[in-house]
Amino acid sequence: MIRPDLSLPIPETIDAAHFIGIGGSGMSGLARMFLARGIRVSGSDRADSPGLRELEALGATVYVGHDAANLADDVDTVIHTGAIWPENPEFVLAKERRLHVIHRSQALHWLIGSHRLVSVAGAHGKTTSTGMIVTGLTAMGENPTFVNGGVIAALGVSSAPGSDDLFVIEADESDGTFLLYDTSIALITNVDPDHLDHYGSRDAFDAAFAQFANEAREAVVISSDDPGAVAVRERITHPNVITFGQATDANVRLHDVESNASGVSFTITVGEQSVSAHMPVAGVHNALNAAGAAAVLVALGHDLEAAVRSLEGFGGTARRFELHDTIGGVSVYDDYAHHPTEVDAALAAARTVVGSGRIIALHQPHTYSRTQLMHREFAEVLENRADHTIVLDVYGAREDPVEGVTGELVSNDFADPSNVHFVADWQAAADYAAQVAQDGDFIVTLGCGNVNLIIPQVLEALAARAK
């Protein structure tokens, strides 16, 4: 992987940009924004995808596979993620040509410019919370610019230029780049320890969140419930801190939460004013995200009633408990959850919807470092929340393989081995999932790697079984 060098200068003007890894959810959103600015865009990714074809339809030149020949002569700026390797041929050639080579966070910084910025950070819930804020603003007649890590269902895109001064982003804490932005209102959904391979210690992780909060120009919105956020709150010296959650002393208090097959209902209270609402997305965690989003909307100057009502149109984001199809009575969902806390929330939400059916989790561990550090926690959550678990092998992402670290680390930690099945081969895993599933069950893929690509195989296996 390449750690972002935020000391590198960001060009004042960009005429032709090349994206290495353009198919990723964050990079494709940035590329879409560059195209909207009238900038020539090209890019490459290791595999073809619908996202690449959508960008091509918008005018981008896209390549499948990384090759120095992809870097056209007119490119002046190369934008990359941290997931590529220093040996990437396009990255190497860009350095040789002395082009501007910047991390995706610096490209986003360039796009933001002097806009009034809302930055959403946290170990979990960033994409959903960002989507809620944007959905709410749009429903109230505003037209913000936004860049999110996933497609917002109500809008059909992950990013779009707006006409207002407001810019809303999902700010990535994984590599510290969320400290790059000149944030006006900071939302911290939670501070669950993660990415310690970058930070080195829990203290450094917490300190980064405290810095993110203290540097906000206008306000900090932070969870009152998450233990990590509560600990970080003690380090925050900002004069305008707004807490949200189910804690009785929260400034924006969430209560009367009820999740079922139709979604989640809740009440939000600020001072003496209370507003009840219903969203068509299940899970207590989504009610908590809504409370944080409502707190941001109020901090932006909106009335509580209007803010909460505006969130009722939020229909979710891509890869967040997303239903793909139902075949033979078995529903197949996909979720981005890749941390034990996220897996717990996703499966808890599924439990409120599945009724008398069972939950079959199809889990792809993400990165060797996280799997090595948290395999016991994953096993505990999966065994507690799912009726049966199928574990795939590790998706390494930016990391080299680590000897002895496979998906089997997770399956070996189950107390009851009959509740889990480790299958490295995807077709065998899809066939096994279809074999185990019964009418009324949910199969839920879990992971932020490429586990969603197994879904067509699962659906085909279900269809074959149904015949």
Image (cartoon, grey):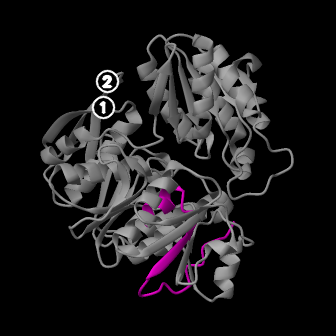
Q: Amino acid at mark 2?
A: Ser
Q: Which residue is mark 2?
A: 262
Tag 2 or tag 1, which sits nearer the N-term? 2
In the figure, 447 relative to 145: above or below?
A: above
Q: Quadrant of the C terminus?
A: top right
> In this orientation, does residue 113 appear?
yes
Q: Secondary structure at mark 2?
A: loop
Q: Which residue is mark 1?
A: 280
Position of 116 with respect to 443 (left or right) is left
Position of 366 with respect to 144 (left or right) is right
Residue at the (30%, 48%) spot, across then down: 155
Give the spatial CA distance, label 1 vs label 2: 6 Å
Location of residue 187 in the rendering, given as x and y in whole percent from the top left corner: 36, 57
Q: Please tell me how crowded label 2 is: few (under 14), some (14-19), or many (20+) other residues with Cα within 10 Å.
A: few
Q: Is residue 307 magenta?
A: no
Q: Secondary structure at mark 1?
A: loop
Whether tag 1 and tag 2 are in contact, CB under 8 A, the answer is yes
Of 130 and 443, which appears nearest the observer?
443
Location of residue 221 in the rendering, given as x and y in whole percent from the top left corner: 33, 57
Question: Which numbered circle lies on residue 406?
Answer: none
- In terms of image quadrants, where is residue 85? bottom right
Q: Which stretch did the figure color magenta?
A: 1-30
Residue at the (69%, 69%) spot, across then down: 67
